[in-house]
Structures are given as structure tokens and as C-alpha cells.
Image (cartoon, rainbow, N blue to C red):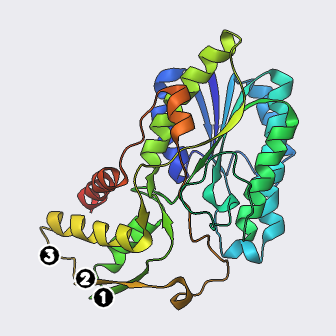
Amino acid sequence: MKILLFGKNGQIGWELNRSLQPLGEIVALGREEADFSNPETLRKIVREIKPDVIVNAVAYTAVDKAEAEEELAATINSEAPGVLAEEAVRIKALLIHYSTDYVFDGTKKGSYIETDEPNPVNAYGRTKLAGEQEIQSSGCDYLILRTTWVYASRGSNFLRTILRLANDHMELRIVSDQHGAPTWARNIADITGHVLVGAQQERHSGRFGSGIYHLCASGKSTWYDFADAIIEQAKILDTKKSIVTEKVLPIATEDYPLPAPRPKNSQLDSSLLMARFRVTMPKWRNAMKLCVDEVLEKQ
């Protein structure tokens, strides 16, 4: 099996380049080899490599910046996946693509399921939803995996930001009225590997059906809960006594205004993915502890 992976240097892509290695020949490309801001150039890449599976881990994820750069965000998040989907049809490849909880407006009580009506409240969410629609209308074999609050031991993300701030600030003020599930990029990548194998088996036996699925850690959190848990775990491992934060205080979204509005409820129900591909979603606290351990070990 030949797998073409886009976004090898991103949080999810870097982990995918590790987790997918046992499954076949991996051709992993980064920004320097594949320019998603110029989608038509992607056609030549797909046609030359002729993969069995295309995994797209590229996205414009600067949520606030997207408010002023929606056209660029749409090119990367919508137009480029549409091109990949068209090429997947041509070569009969499976396309795996990642999307986001931000396609929803966050007003639902309880967890979102795949059939809930999307209603994005910011530019990033609109462009990601448009990308889903481009893929769905293409006629290719696809799996769109929506995930939430992604973090990793590398790159720029909430967990690493909190660990950095904890070295300098006695007190942190963190939003406590947005709900979701922090999801480790490594878990996303590992589960994707299982899903990919299962999907290819279904395709070979004629049982495959394309669809959108939710893939996120189990459990419920707020950004405040997440930050508090990160600090607690870091202090356990802080042999250098570099963590100076003594208090993590909850604040309202309105107390920390940002250019792009955020959904208050980002909880996604992963039951459908778990049932179809027989995977289990790790608890967010357990995954967080492992990731904090890894970050601190590198310091």
C-alpha cells in the first residue's frame, strides 16, 4: 500500500509520519514540497505518486488570523482538499481528511453527533466546512475525521503555551466556559492508522462507505480544567523547580476577547467511529499526562 501524506511537519502530520510507517510505503510531504496555497500544483504530485491512500493533514489553523485572511484560509482549507478529492476519484484512492468542531456554533446541549447541522461562527469554521463539502461532492472514497482542541509535544499549541507561561507567571487566568475534549495528536495519528487499515479492508471487499466521523479524546473539559491539569502534572515532574504558577483562575470568554468568536460547546461524540472501526478513545487526562511528561523530558 502506498500512502501519500500531506503536512508531515504539522502536529498531526508529524505523528502520522510515525504511526503510518508500518502500513506500507509512505511518501510524506511538507510545505516546501506541496503548496496548498496553490491547489492546482497538487494535481501533478498525486498523478506522479499514484497513491492508494491520500492523507491530508494540512490546514490553515490560525483561527483569529483567518478573520482577516479568509480567502487564503479558504484556498488551503477548502479549494485544496477539493483538488485532492478530484484526483482521488481519478486514481481510485481513499482520501482521509481532518476537520474540526468549529463547523458547529456551540449552542447544542450535550455532545455533537455527525448528523447535527453545522453552523460555523468564524472564518476558520466556514472554510473547514466548505472543505468537507468539496470532498463530499467529489464522489471519491473519503473519511473526514473531525477532532477538537489538538495539542502535541511539538509545535505551537495550548499545552506547550501553558508550560511556558508556568515558568514566568505566578497566576494564570484561563477561560472556563468553553467545553470540549483536549485531544493529543499522537492519539489521532494512532487511531487513524487503525481506521485506514479497516477502511482499505472494507474497500477491497466492497463494503466501504464514505462518511464524516468524530475523533476526539473521551471525557469533558474546559480550557481552565485543561490548564489546571497541565500545571498539576508539570509540578509532579518539576525536579528543577521551574514551575512558578501557584493559581489558575477561571474567567469568562468575554474577559478574554479575541478577533474570532469561539463555540461555547465543542464536545463531539465519537461513538460512531468507535463502533465501525472498533477503536477506543483515550481519556484526555491520561493522554495529557503522557504528553506533559514527554515535553518536560526534552527540556
Are circles 3 and 1 on residues that touch, CB within 8 Å? no
Q: Residue furthest top?
A: 205
* Residue 225 in view, yes or no: yes
Compared to 213, does 283 lie above or below? below
Residue at screen point 56% across, 21% down = 198
Compared to 160, does 138 lie above or below? above
Q: Residue under label 1, please give it.
A: 171
**Amino acid type, label 1:** Glu
Where's the C terminus, which quadrant?
bottom left
- Disc 2 is placed on an element classified as loop
In depth, the one of 80 and 262 nearer the eye is 262
Q: Residue under label 2, please give it.
A: 245
Residue 225, image x, y percentages: 36, 70
Residue at screen point 22% across, 77% down = 243
Counting residues from the start of the chain, the first of labels 3 and 1 encountered is 1
Residue at screen point 48% across, 35% down = 191
Residue 205, image x, y percentages: 66, 9
